Amino acid sequence: MSAVVVGVDDSENSLRAVEWAAGEAGRRRQPLQILHAFIWPLLGVPLGRAPGAPPEGGLRHAAERILATALARAHAVAPDVEVTTSLPEGEPVTALLHRSHQAGLLVVGSRGLGEVGGLLLGSVGARLGAEAVCPVVVVRGPVTPRGPVVVGIDDRGESEAVLAFAFAHAARTTNALIVAHAGAEGSASGSRPPLPEHDLARWQERFPTVTIDQETLTGRPDKALMHAASQASLLVVGSHHRHELSALMHGSVSQAVLHHATCPVAIIQVHP
């Protein structure tokens, strides 16, 4: 059975990601794996405690405390979920990308570097969103569990995977789903609904408990989507780029909302 994998560090943002991931693992009835990448051995740094330091000192004990704190937070949210911890040696993105080949979902927190810092310095979430094999959720800001799920589709059309992820999440959380069409800025999409009637009927038959609304957005796609998702519990977008640099150079909507949205963002790889 595939697991929900969440990456943690020593930040409160990553613990919020653990809480979200634990809840999602419970809804999916899947195990949760908490991962903290331990990079220090690769740098040749002493891992044990310094002479005269307390027994619990040292970098390895600090890493183990990060995992223990995250484990306690996960159990508090979802006591019935099977939870394991992992302390692989390596760089965080590399470790998480490796796990994405077996995981059903990767979850990380956002450090909120701001408009310039987030784009220029990059982040774990940005690289995962561009390169991971499985869907990625980046937990940003306060979580609104009862808000609608918003899925953005564009003029190129989206793969079934993007809509399937959004519909399934809305069904699991019993939240409404907003299908938002965000075409290129200035495009004349008129008042047509994002999903044709026959497609809408097909999805409604597949997920009969989901209440569906449709919106046609105007203006810059990234800003319009973020506005539509201002009260959302999750924003779901597709990524057409396999590398973060390519995504930024081509004005990727998924990367823009990933850095600036005020709710958790799910990024689903869209393959041609």
Image (cartoon, rainbow, N blue to C red):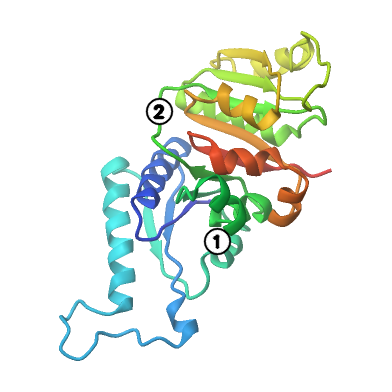
Q: Is residue 3 above or below residue 26?
A: below
Q: What residue appears at the point 46 percent right and 68 percent down from the top-left corner?
A: 37
Q: Give how far apart the Cα atoms at labels 2 and 1 are.
A: 26 Å
Which residue has dot 2 on it?
Answer: 145
- View extreme (bottom): residue: 51
- Image coordinates for residue 263, horizontal then vertical, percent: 48, 34
**Along the viewing direction, whichever of 4 and 70 lies nearer the viewer:** 70
**Left or right placement of residue 246 versus residue 11 in this view:** right
The residue most toward the front is 116
In this orientation, does residue 243 appear?
A: no
Mark 2 Cα-neighbour bin, 10 Å: few <14, some 14–19, many ≥20: some
Please identify the quarter of the rendering in which residue 235 is found: top right
Please identify the quarter of the rendering in which residue 245 is found.
bottom right
Q: Which residue is mark 1?
A: 96
Classify mark 1: helix, strand or loop: helix
- Horizontal side of residue 71 vs 253, given as left or right: left
Q: What type is the residue that disc 2 sits on?
A: Pro
Quarter that holds the C terminus: top right
Label for residue 255? Answer: none
Q: Position of residue 120 (x, y in %)?
A: 61, 56
Determine if residue 257 is in view.
Answer: yes
> Which callout, 2 or 1, points at the residue further toward the start of the chain?
1
